[in-house]
Image: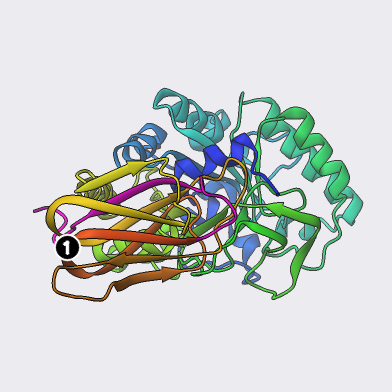
Amino acid sequence: MIKPSKKQLEFMEWEIGIFYHFGIRTFYPGHKDWDGRESELLPEGFKPENLNCEQWIFVAKQAGAKYTILTAKHHDGFALWPSKFTDYNISKTPWKYGKGDVVLEYVQACRKYGMKIGIYYSPADVSSKRKKMTDKEYDNVFVNQISELLSNYGKIDYLWFDGCGSENHEYDTKRIIRVIRSLQPEILIFDMWDPDTRWIGNEAGFAPLNNSYITDTVPFSIRTDTQHILKEKKFLPGECDVQMRPFTWFTSENNENTVKTLDQLMGLYDYSVGRGSNLLINIGPDSKGMLPKKDTRRILEFGDAIRKRFSNPIYEQTNAELDTNYEIVMELDYDELANCMVLEENLENGESITGFQVIAQPEFAYQPIVLCERYTMGHKAICTFPAVFSKHFMIKVKSDRRDCVKRIAIYYTKNNYFE
């Protein structure tokens, strides 16, 4: 059986992350990826008058996120640190008279608040094409910049590669991975080449209902249906990335009236974390270098709602073994109104559950009622159903192990998360 690594198990416990798309595009509204206007994104436009990475991370912490990711270099090629391997970097801007380093301030803020540190790096770089680099020359820049990020800022927990724009480029992947693993042996790599986690395949925040962790292919770009084929099947937890404001990653490109509602975010939580994947929510800091007020309020409301919804189970059981019928029967003290069951699989020895049912037996029903049926359980399965009044519940599991269920919790949750 294919087992997860310790760091993969820890990654799944993080559950919620905050993505920060911030860079030269923040200061040039109207520009889009690959629109051919990247040469207009001049370094002198980068002037965040009140950059406050501590605000970013404090808000993420208050919202219940366990990790954050900063776009150290997006597709435009602009480096948010004083890279020695490109002139298109923060040292060429008027901000702090060219002496600033956003990556450093971000990393320091993460460490202050105990946040896991993620760095986004786009392998694709439009600025390299303007300089007419060969693939080999660009790979040298790639390796040197990654080495800067992984050598100069202490421990980095997560390296997030974006495959968009790399569809037709042959990278020296063996060299790249060798350098990364030698500089940061404990790092998690997202999705590409030697992945520890995988992109779920969309930017809508949804994981599929059948969401197995075992795979030998990974999607890597919204611009192609072609997938990376791995050398062998691997255990790869999924991650669902999604924008707080639809159709944009950078705040400057859209107005605050498009910020997702609390109900939308709660639904995305169920469709991502509730299907065994992590949820990565993007908030673009504004041109002042602060998180926008409406986005901030919404993500804090989201954190409060999650805590409220799952703070008081009416029933909870851990490490319960399946009986000889591969069932677990739950007898409550008395009839309760319930509309949600949260199930967690014991994944230390690998994924073994291939299907399960949540069942209730209300008094006078005479026949059991199947409330929910799924294929995979994974790190967390959030099963919601119309409210039922019962003291008898059961889960029926398909597995070759009787110790496969780590936790069961039953809840009654209301639509008004703040009641």
> Residue 57 at x, y = what percent?
39, 36
Q: Is residue 130 left or right of residue 162?
A: right
Q: Could you tell me the amino acid type at mark 1?
A: Ser
Label 1 residue SS: strand
The span picked out in magenta is: 398-419
Q: Main secondary structure of the magenta part?
A: loop
Does the rendering let one see residue 24? Answer: yes
The residue labelled by disc 1 is: 390
Query: Measuring 32% from the left and 43% from the top, which residue is drawn there?
Result: 317
> Residue 50 at x, y = what percent?
36, 37
In this view of the protein, which residue sits in the foreground, 403 or 7?
403
Q: Is residue 226 left or right of residue 342?
A: right
> Residue 343 at x, y = what percent?
39, 53
Query: Measuring 51% from the left and 67% from the top, which residue is drawn there?
Result: 375
In the image, is residue 307 part of the stretch drawn in magenta?
Answer: no
> Residue 187 at x, y = what percent?
65, 35
Query: Measuring 47% from the left and 60% from the top, which residue is drawn there?
Result: 397
Query: Measuring 63% from the left and 55% from the top, which residue is drawn there?
Result: 198
Q: Quadrant of residue 272?
A: bottom left
Does the rendering let one see residue 93? Answer: no
